[in-house]
Image (spheres, helix red, strand yellow):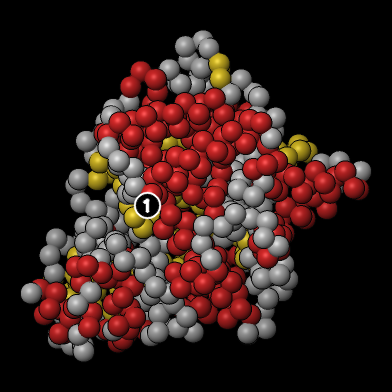
Amino acid sequence: MSVKRVIGTETEFGILSATQSNPIHLSAALVDAYASAGAGSPSGPIRWDYRGEDPLNDARGFRLERASADPSQLTDNPEAMAPSGPVAVRRPSEAEMSMPRASNTVLSNGARFYVDHAHPEYSGPETLGPLDAVLYDRAGEHIARDAMEIAGRAGTEYIVYKNNVDGKGATYGSHENYLVDRSVDFDDLVGALIPFFVTRPVLCGAGRVGRGQRSEEPGFQISQRADYVENDIGLETTFNRPIINTRDEPHAGTRWRRLHVIGGDANLFDISNFLKFGTTAAVLWVLENSGVGLELDSLAIADPVWETQEVSYDLSLTHRIALRDGSSATALDIQASYARLCRDAMTAAGPLDDETRLLLDTWDEVIEMLRTDMFAAARKVEWVAKYQMLEAMRARGSMTWRDPKLAAFDLQWHDLRAGRSIVDRLDRAGRIDRLFSLSEVVQAATVPPENTRAFVRGSLITAFPGDVYAAAWDSVTVDAGGESLLRIPTLNPLAGTRDLVGDALEAPDISTFLHRLRG
């Protein structure tokens, strides 16, 4: 029994510069400099193929009409869907090749680095399980640091932040994606996951100075995203943000649906990230294998949107959440119920693998720490560590929560520049429990995971850099020297792994690779 499932991450970074103010231009310059330097792909930028994108497909069983969609929802190119088998693609003309294109590149670790709206975004490669999801999310931080250094050689200093708010009303996402068996009824997913997501930030919030979307009220809260939750369910991601997002774009055939989670915080602590990904994967396993059960029904929250903010503001962790059946429970009570249910169901079904055992033990351990001695969890839970340091600052300086020094500390916490980040300093002092070493993170920035289709995508870029024309989650388009380009489908996220294609990658050229792959 395992928490291993296909997980993907999307991190939008904040960006600033002392000499430029337009975040779109800054983001484009950062991504273009990194791509052109060959840091992610030896041959420079690799195009993104939008043909498999379908952002208006709703998990509730319909598709939003393009004419009715907000422009921010149109992240696709409305062309034909990805093919089911290798197909020839018209070779672009020289004029088309020279036309400007959006700042974007596909990396040798299988990830995508590009500009999304006004932010540089790192979309990590598909990973199999929460541990690899943590590793490749941290690889994105390393890539952002490299991009700052490379882009800064032209004379402009770029400052990239891994956070979710600017304190002035804007928020940007740190999204999670989980493949879920489509046999699970979507209404069951909604009912089971709403109480879970409302209370999950006590384990994995990043913490924030200020309350309200524009930090209208002084104070500290657990979650960076809580003030921006305005609905319980919906397709939107940039406005009227829901607890359960219904965008169903699995890039993985008909067996799977995509659970697109938009309410999580961007974490810099490994354990917070591990709990974020792992507990969600465990709950999904229960839904796929054991059904919802009466116990989850009993956790239904009377007003989940309201309680999202209340949980985030409750630093004592004692707030009683009103449940639909008339009873009440704290966020820790609800998380403990999920943890117990997952442990019981998974243990009863068979032996646990090491990753699942680590996840379940860590879940229980952190809940107990938060109940009995909150600051004992400071090495593991990001918001607790930030809150502890801010409270020490307030005590030393007799500060109120309105003091701008506290807001500046909050921003510096998420600064990704080496030596400037508060988290970097804590890490160097050995005050953060890490799951991966720096050398492992550096390697993951260039080497793809071996157990998902990201392996063939990233490895092709490394092995035949001049022959990869474009890529998407569900295809790679290569130039094998013929009259047309060839689009290779990668619809199965568990195909294209080292075990399946490793020998073919030893081919001397792309044509031989394709011949061996077909064989």
Image point (33%, 42%), residue name: 352
Indicate the secondary structure of the residue bearing disc 1.
loop
Tell whether 121 sits left or right of 354: right
Looking at the figure, which quarter contains the C terminus?
A: bottom left
Q: Is residue 427 above or below residue 179?
A: below
Whole-percent x, y for residue 214 in the image: 69, 43
Report the residue marked by disc 1: 129
Looking at the figure, which quarter contains the N terminus?
A: top left
Three-letter amino acid code of the residue under disc 1: Gly
Q: Is residue 372 above or below residue 2?
A: above
Whole-percent x, y for residue 425 in the image: 71, 63
Observer-nearest residue: 486 or 357?
357
Image point (44%, 69%), residue name: 444
Tell whether 42 sits left or right of 468: right
Image point (45%, 32%), residue name: 339
Disc 1 crowd, CA 10 A, few/some/many (<14, 14-19, 20+): many
